[in-house]
Image (tube, rainbow, N blue to C red):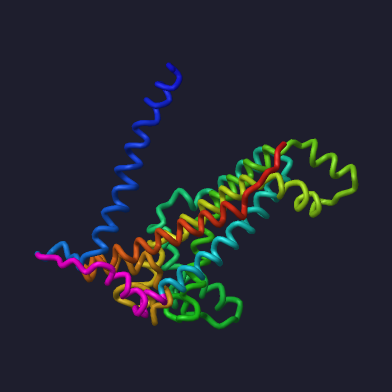
Amino acid sequence: MKNNRFVYTILTPIFICMIVFTLLPILIGLGISLFDYNPLAAGNAFVGFENFKKLTTDGVFHIALKNTLIFVLVTVSLNIVLALLIAQAISSMRSNKTRSFTRMIFFMPIVAPLAASSLVWKVMYANKYGLFNNILGNLGLPTQNWLGDPAWLLPAIILFTIWADIGYNIIIFSAGMDGIPHDFIEAAAIDGAGPVRRFFFITLPLLGRTTAFVVTMTLISHFQMFAQFEIMGRSAGSPGGGGPNNVGMVLTLEIYKEAFKYKNMGYASAIALVLFLIILVVTVISQRISRSDWRY
């Protein structure tokens, strides 16, 4: 009984915070989505599900949804694969100091605020004096309008996002690899398995739970990315962000514009609820697919 009371005492503040800061905002957002709500106007009319019906005919929303799905699919896939390979390379280093130093180097971009990093990379992407175009020019290759060309804006943001976010996953995968008993690796090596076979048949299966966690957290994080789209999209000549022809428009940026630029809180809440449902469904699916029963 005393143990149960202690557990309830510890968990009660956590549940209260979850209700206040998670469940309550969702319910408030659902309520606002049913109104033509403008915080600066009086007499906001109840419109029912009209805001949700508007989503089916809103071309900008469709573009934002498509861009969001493409962005998440590409960044999460590349992030996970590259993080696994880099973590494996780090774990193969013999010196503990070298491993620690390499992990620190890859983790450093995480420390900087995403908005600040976006501003730095915007300068690096600049047409005339940017780092990337200077490198291309010195190599005798044609320069690119990275943030002004619809064909390059989204790839440029994807490249930045992978650089800014991959360090966290490298640390998690490295910790998971360090936790794998070395006896398994040695036994596979004695049986004649090379590094590639050991990675795919020993390391990767035993990282099942770690991979499931990394995939889930990366999906949730990348669906909510905002700063780089706002900053780099504006630099592309679009006063409201999103880049030329809305090629850099994503759901988070559309929510921001509807809520704070157009003061259309009801419609913004409807988009936010759709984004919440997408994240929820994708997270559940990824957890089902990534479920692992490996023990060691």
* Residue 136 vertical placement versus 178 (above, below): below
Residue 227 percent across, percent down from the top left = 38, 61
In the picture, measured across the screen, residue 177 lies left or right of residue 286, that is right
Residue closest to the eye, 151 or 8: 8
In the picture, measured across the screen, residue 137 lies left or right of residue 197, that is left
Q: Residue at x 59, y 53 (%)?
A: 288
Quadrant of the frame with the N terminus: top left
Residue at the limit of the structure toward the top, as seen here: 2
Q: Hey, which quadrant is residue 242 in on the image?
A: bottom left
Residue closest to the eye, 271 or 156: 271
Residue at the limit of the structure toward the right, as seen here: 191
Q: Residue at x 51, y 59 (%)?
A: 282
Q: Hey, which quadrant is residue 252 in on the image?
A: bottom left
Residue 160 percent across, percent down from the top left = 49, 64
Q: Decide whether residue 53 is among the magenta residues.
A: yes
* Residue 227 vertical placement versus 12 (above, below): below
Residue 93 percent across, percent down from the top left = 72, 44
Q: Hey, which quadrant is residue 233 in on the image?
A: bottom left
> For the image shown, how many numbered marks are present on the structure?
0
> Is residue 235 at least partly visible in the picture?
no
* Residue 143 vertical placement versus 209 (above, below): below
Quadrant of the frame with the C terminus: top right
In the picture, measured across the screen, residue 134 lies left or right of residue 139, that is left
Q: Residue at x 44, y 77 (%)?
A: 127
Q: Residue at x 70, y 38 (%)?
A: 295
> Is residue 133 at least partly visible in the picture?
yes
Residue 2 percent across, percent down from the top left = 43, 16
The magenta region covers 43-63
Q: Decide whether residue 286 is among the magenta residues.
A: no
